Image (spheres, rainbow, N blue to C red):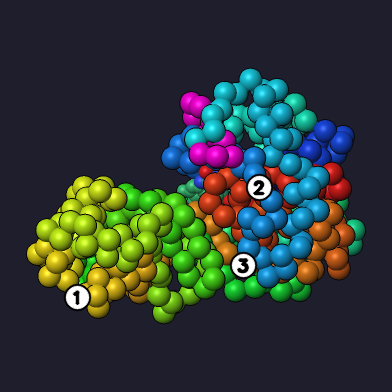
Amino acid sequence: MAAHYDVIVIGAGAAGLMCAATAGYRGRRVLVIDHANKPGKKILMSGGGRCNFTNLNSTPANFLSDNPHFCISALKRYTPQHFLDLVDRHGVEYEEKAPGQLFGKHSAKDILNVLLTECEWAGAEIRLKTHIRNIAATEPGYRLTTGSGSISCDSLVVACGGLSIPTMGASGFGYDIARQFGLTVLPTRAGLVPFTLHPELKEQLAPLSGISCPVDVSCRKEHFREPMLVTHRGLSGPSMLQISSFWQPGDPLAINLLPTCSAREDLLALRSNKPQSTVAHYLAQHLPKRFAAAFNDLHGWTGPLQGYKNSDIEQVAATLNQWAIKPAGTEGYRTAEVTLGGVDTRQLSSKTMATLARPDLYFIGEVVDVTGHLGGHNFQWAWASGVAAGGDA
Ligand code: FDA
């Protein structure tokens, strides 16, 4: 006979572990299955190894979804403060690196240990290196055929994440399960991902590689004022990752390199007051020195400002306040932090994450079409959706 559990959770990541502990504390017999050799691999690599585990300012406006209201209920019922209380109860030290963005003070391992300890206390079992070959509905419940035998359950929670970083165990399995049970999966694409550039522009920007500067980038009516990093592959840094979630192939980006200044007014005033001054001098006062010099050389802005006609100044100013760039593409799932799209939330209960057609089948975390901005919002969704399902499954 197949071993039987009240709840089987597929995926020992952020959402799955949170769900398992929550269901376990309700007295449910819970098994978490993962094909990877370790639980929570993405937690360990997140936030530069320190895990940006929540954002105190997280609101539904920080999430992208085809059905934007869906996330409200779960996020309201499990807030950043709830997760912070949990972290505090475990004595884990943390710090606010940027406004609202909470990171482990020492290591992301501390955050993973909170979840693993909670699962242990709640009696949830975790089985790794387990490959699921088949899932069958048994009315009631489900039977899973794995490489090491069959198991059955009353409730099945799908928490297998999205497609980003396949080397960390990401797979499209969650989407396959959704399709198997007749759910719609909205088109997926890489989000929070660096941009690649066409060869000519990449070569031109090569001297800027490794330099970061604060910019305001906009695309499709969205904009983010955060640092941009030029890399040897293209454009990265928080501003680029953020806008990548809104960018579509072929879109230009408008990058304001001087978001706190009107370059036009400044340069016109400078030409009147200090006609011998140069664009290079002006840039050096407002941008990191190496970036200023390389950007100036790139555009060939030479000679004193008194030699610049009004139209020249307009052109320089437009480049500085609205530098238009057409990325070649993105680095894709290989380096993306998240996957946009996924299981259509119109088929799920916003209170429990259960599918409307099958109240014993749940989808949580990144596999669902809810994607956060950069800054701890994605983990907050994993916790909130995990708790919502764990309270019902
Ligand atoms: P997650 O991907 O965490 O877990 C899914 C689990 O399912 C994995 O353990 C996987 O092995 C398993 N699985 C997949 N297919 C399976 C199959 N066929 N059978 C069995 N198991 C299977 N977010 C944030 O808020 N703050 C941050 O600092 C960062 N930083 C960050 C850095 C990097 C490099 C990445 C890639 C991502 C982030 N993120 C982040 C995003 C965050 O990691 C992500 O949103 C959550 O991990 C999603 O949690 P899930 O539990 O849904 O999926």
Residue 341's disc number: 3
Q: Which of label 2 and label 3 is nearer to you?
A: 2
- Please give the range of residues in magenta: 98-109
Q: Earlier in the sequence, mark 2 or mark 1?
A: 2
Q: Per the image, is 107 magenta? A: yes
Q: Residue at x 78, y 30 (%)?
A: 122
The residue pinned by badge 2 equals 58
Marks 2/3: CA–CA distance: 20 Å
Assign a secondary structure to mark 3.
strand
Indicate whether 168 appears above or below 192.
Answer: above
Q: Nearer the viewer, residue 268 or 65?
A: 268
- The residue that mark 1 highlights is 309
Of residues 369 and 264, the one nearer the viewer is 264
Q: Earlier in the sequence, mark 3 or mark 1?
A: 1
In the image, the residue with mark 2 has its CB under 8 Å from the nearest atom of ligand 1: no
Q: Secondary structure at mark 1?
A: loop
Amino acid type of the residue that numbered disc 2 sits on in the rendered structure? Ser
Q: Position of residue 5 (x, y in %)?
A: 81, 44
Q: CA distance from mark 3 to mark 1?
A: 49 Å
Judge depth for marks 2 and 1 and give the one in front: 1
View extreme (front): residue? 273
Q: Is residue 286 left or right of residue 10?
A: left
Residue 373's mark? none
Q: What SS does tag 2 mark?
A: loop
Q: Residue furthest right?
A: 140
Going from N to C along the chain, the mark reached first, 2 or 3, is 2
Residue sitting at x 54%, y 46% = 375
Give the crowd class for mark 1: few <14, some 14-19, many >=20 residues within 10 Å: few
Q: Position of residue 80 (x, y in %)?
A: 69, 39
